[in-house]
Image (spheres, rainbow, N blue to C red):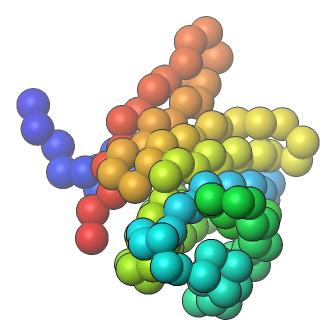
């Protein structure tokens, strides 16, 4: 059976809404980015990316020798998958940076309820099954 990629993202949102109940969820997103070209001023591009993404989440930039990291934390009521998808897609759309990998943690209060990790093409989400007896693993794809 084939499913449209967005169906799994919608399923992820429904599961997170179920788990967080009436509480607000908090997402912590960390993306490792690399420059697309050796001539790119990484520090400048990370600052610019942080500004370009400020409407999604307030990202802090961390520069290393050959790569950088963009990290944000945001409280959300719904649309958690939008924060992840929009952030990764827009980081890649800048053209000067490429997301080599990312990790997102979703919390209800101080309890970790979902872990999402991946790269620019695919993501994997791990969350507890409704019964609480097993884990659910969702394979997610980034589409433009």
* Residue 126 spot, x, y in % from top left: 55, 30
Residue 86 in sight from this viewpoint: no
Quadrant for residue 2, please give it: top left
Tell which residue pokes out farthest to the front in this image: 39
Is 11 positioned to the left or the right of 116 in the image?
A: left
* Residue 87 spot, x, y in % from top left: 53, 70
Residue at image position (27%, 62%) is: 143
* Residue 66 spot, x, y in % from top left: 62, 59
Is 96 positioned to the left or the right of 1 in the image?
A: right
Query: Which part of the image, by quadrant, shows the C terminus?
Result: bottom left
Above-or-below relation of 106 to 52 = above
Residue 44 in sight from this viewpoint: yes
Marks counted in the figure total 0
Query: Which part of the image, by quadrant, shows the N terminus?
Result: top left
* Between 33 and 11, the one nearer to me in the picture: 33
* Between 69 and 56, the one nearer to me in the picture: 69
Quadrant for residue 31, please give it: bottom right
* Between 65 and 80, the one nearer to me in the picture: 65
* Residue 26 spot, x, y in % from top left: 77, 57
Residue at image position (18%, 51%) is: 4
Above-or-below relation of 91 to 2 = below
Tell which residue pokes out farthest to the top in this image: 133
Residue at image position (45%, 36%) is: 124
Tell which residue pokes out farthest to the left in this image: 1
Residue at image position (88%, 47%) is: 109
Tell which residue pokes out farthest to the right in this image: 110
Above-or-below relation of 32 to 15 = below
Is 6 positioned to the left or the right of 106 in the image?
A: left
Above-or-below relation of 95 to 66 = below
């Amino acid at each position: 059976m084939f499913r449209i990629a967005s169906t799994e993202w919608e399923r992820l949102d429904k599961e997170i809404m179920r788990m967080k109940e009436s509480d607000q969820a908090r997402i912590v997103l960390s993306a490792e980015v690399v420059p697309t070209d050796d001539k790119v001023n990484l520090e400048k591009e990370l600052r610019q990316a942080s500004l370009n993404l400020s409407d999604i989440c307030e990202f802090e930039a961390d520069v290393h020798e050959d790569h950088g990291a963009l990290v944000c934390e945001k409280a959300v009521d719904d649309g958690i998958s939008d924060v992840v998808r929009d952030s990764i897609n827009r980081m890649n759309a800048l053209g000067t940076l490429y997301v080599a990998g990312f990790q997102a943690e979703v919390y209800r209060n101080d309890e970790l309820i979902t872990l999402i990790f991946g790269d620019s093409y695919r993501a994997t989400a791990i969350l507890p099954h409704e019964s609480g007896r097993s884990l659910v693993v969702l394979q997610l794809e980034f589409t433009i």
